[in-house]
Image (cartoon, rainbow, N blue to C red):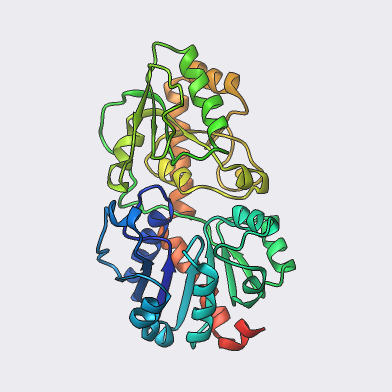
Amino acid sequence: MARLVFIGLSITSSWGNGHATTYRGLVKALARRGHEITFLERDVPWYAANRDMPDPPYCRTVLYADLADLEAKGGAAVAEADAVVVGSYVPEGVAVGRWALDRAAGPVAFYDIDTPVTLAKLAAGDEAYIDAALVADYALYLSFTGGPMLDRLKAMGSPQAAALYCSVDPEIHKPVAVRRQWRLGYLGTYSPDRQPTVEALLVAPARDLANDRFVVAGPQYPETIDWPQNVSRIEHLPPSDHAAFYCGQDFTLNVTRADMRAAGYAPSVRLFEAAACGVAIISDAWPGLETILAPEREILIAHDAQEARRILETTDGETRDAIAAAARRAVLARHTCDHRASELETLLDAVGRGGRTTAAA
């Protein structure tokens, strides 16, 4: 058993972020493996008003108001931890990272759930939650993105960079018996760089296929978007409702943020969730996708509106269901939260043998 501390964006609220889903699955799996976990989360109004899991049962959750409160409430846990993991998008993340490095006796890792976005921010001089010096000072850089991005991190001075992809909790995301009511659906918070792909691969086919029903779920979409009448909108879905949502679709859409699509090797948590629910996925294209799911056999790729419409109109039910079943088998074999917990144990054990000297290097 190890004592682990996470300092992350949020585990208590999934509103407008995928971080909570990732942390919940990973921490739950780590606790099941016998580890003692403390999760430190900045108490901010937008999550405080939308907490769908205020007290996760598999860890001790501590909400802090500011850096002084973080020290008061979390200083002892960090000092006594066998390892500390600081997440991306943590408010005042640079100061939090420096504090963790100074306070911890064991190794401190950075878990970047947004690696291509992070490096684009750093290139633009934006150091909201990490700076170039911290990249080198963290003992381990855990990245949601694999492939060439790991070489970039090592070139920036990271002593060890490794992919720790998102994952799925198969106890929550699994096939459920519900009525299929949508031809194609999409689940994701609004993002300006994702919306053009949503428009091309879902909205445009919806305009052409007026007799079919479509759905988009997720918060923060501007009221100025002109949704076709056959596209339903759901403002927010807690993770407990994801399975029923996915299983109510013939196909579900996976859309990747622009920076992550350009970098490649960046599967989204929604990709794994939908696959685990046994729903056929139509995805945008990005390098490395074939290392996650096999195109045409486990996932369908659409580059534009015409290809998306062709898939919807020509894929028969037997082919669709076979693709969905193959994707579910692939994800359950390699991409569950238990797989990630095991990978994290191995990575932390390797850097832990070097202790603080690894971080200082």
User: Where does the N terminus fall, quadrant-wise?
Assistant: bottom left
Residue 108, compared with residue 277, is above or below; it is: below
Residue 103, compared with residue 344, is above or below; it is: below
Residue 175 appears anywhere in the view: no
Q: Position of residue 264 (x, y in %)?
A: 64, 47
Which residue is at a point 50% across and 18% down the rendered structure image?
205
Residue 153 appears anywhere in the view: yes
Q: Position of residue 245 (x, y in %)?
A: 32, 35
Residue 292, compared with residue 247, is above or below; it is: below
Count of labels in the image: 0
Give the side of residue 258 with respect to residue 220, left or right.
right
Which residue is at a point 39% across and 83% down the rendered structure image?
75
Give the side of residue 359 with respect to residue 314, left or right.
right
Q: Position of residue 191 (x, y in %)?
A: 51, 40
Which residue is at a point 44% across and 66% down the rendered structure image?
341
Q: Nearer the viewer, residue 256 or 334?
A: 256
- Quarter-of-image position of residue 77: bottom left
Q: Nearer the viewer, residue 223 or 186?
A: 223
